[in-house]
Amino acid sequence: MTTINPNRLFSACCIALITTAMTFAIRAGILNELSKTFNFTDTQLGWINSMAFLGFPLAMMVGGLLYNSVGARTLMYLAFVSHLLGLILTITAGGFWGLLISTFFIGFANGSVEAAANPLIVDIYHTNKTAKLNKFHMWFPGGIVIGALISTAMTSFGHGWQAQIAVMLIPTAIYGYMIFGQQFPEPVNTETSTKANISALISPLFLIMAFTMTLTATTELGTQQWVQRILSASGAQPMLILAMVTGLMAVGRYFAGPIIHALNPAGVLLVSSVIAAIGIYLMSSASGAMVYVAAILFAVGVMYFWPTMIGFVGEYLPKTGALGMSLIGGAGMFGVSMWNPIIGGWIDAAKANALAKGLSGEAAELAAGQAALSNLALFPVALVVIFTGLYIYRKKVAK
């Protein structure tokens, strides 16, 4: 009988997450080329982007419900097949509908990775799960750095968007090779616990956190996904900004423990929303070197949003279990999918307005990007209000 190889499975999960992150970064890097190649409006680009963020929560919802029944092996196989199909369909896409469908498959693959890997790591590292989960989640911002640098380098050498998409077939093939034929552990949870998890989801606090997750995720990922279109005329290099922001996020998340212990999750979320609001506001008016300064503030503001929101549910709503954490992540991605076409519409409208005022092409692009950032700054402003209330609530409950 084949024995379980924990290190191989963990490494495969990390490479799968790198693949997931690279799809975010490289898609952000090729938006300008897609716009020129197919004559897309930014609203159309927004719909294409939204498919990745729609497929993700759908896969997480399905995977979270089925994990106890089918286990990690089936979900990881599903992720591999969906990544392979989505990337090949993207490379061969001839227009809007082809890209819409292929991007959905990529998003579904990304969500399947998350739905499988988080509980799998918990199942194989019972006594070291927190440390291993931290090391695993580092590879999302880490993979975005890798993808952003690859996209920048390939663009500078004249390699088009199809070639940049094709690069992601390499890590896909690697993690596929690492999982096929491997023995996976049986899920620790039972079907009974899944039913209990579902019952625990009907909680006002969980519903508030699920809604709030749509705002934190859009603040973080909505801004990052549109970085090329928003900052291309700012005098800064958008993909290098993306690499810098996500690199800082990876480092910040690695050392998050003492900060969360000092402030508690609600306090971290409140401080983060204040800094994120300042960072996006400064980016909306900055140009040249000051864009990098504003981007650093933005990175500090958003770096703890995703893991702390999931950690809050795990700590204060423990009866929701792994399903609750999966659905919180899914809510975040679903929110981004809904806001992406709207963000694209903001850019289209602002650019049209700037051109109507007599601005040149480059100046109009800059004005459109800054207008979109001004609107995006409203998300963390709303979060300041919500997290202030949450912080006060947690203080009263703690007493």
Image (cartoon, helix red, strand yellow):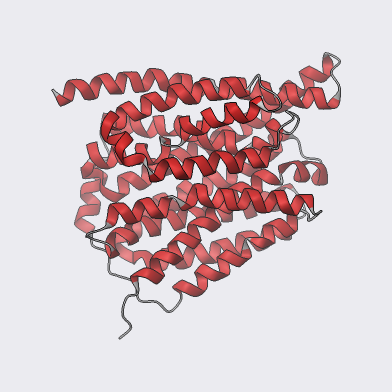
Quarter of the figure with the C terminus: top left
With respect to residue 88, does 214 lie above or below? above
Q: Position of residue 210 (x, y in %)?
A: 37, 34
Residue extending furthest left? 399
Relative to residue 234, is residue 257 drawn left or right?
A: left
Quarter of the figure with the N terminus: bottom left
In the depicted view, which residue is nearer to us: 131 or 162? 131
Q: Position of residue 297 (x, y in %)?
A: 52, 28
Q: Position of residue 335 (x, y in %)?
A: 49, 35
Image point 27% across, 62% down: which residue? 125
Image point 68% across, 62% down: which residue? 166
With respect to residue 333, does 346 lie above or below? above
Residue 75 appears in which quarter of the rendering?
A: bottom left
In the depicted view, which residue is nearer to us: 149 or 161? 149
Q: Position of residue 114 (x, y in %)?
A: 42, 54
Relative to residue 39, is residue 229 drawn left or right?
A: left
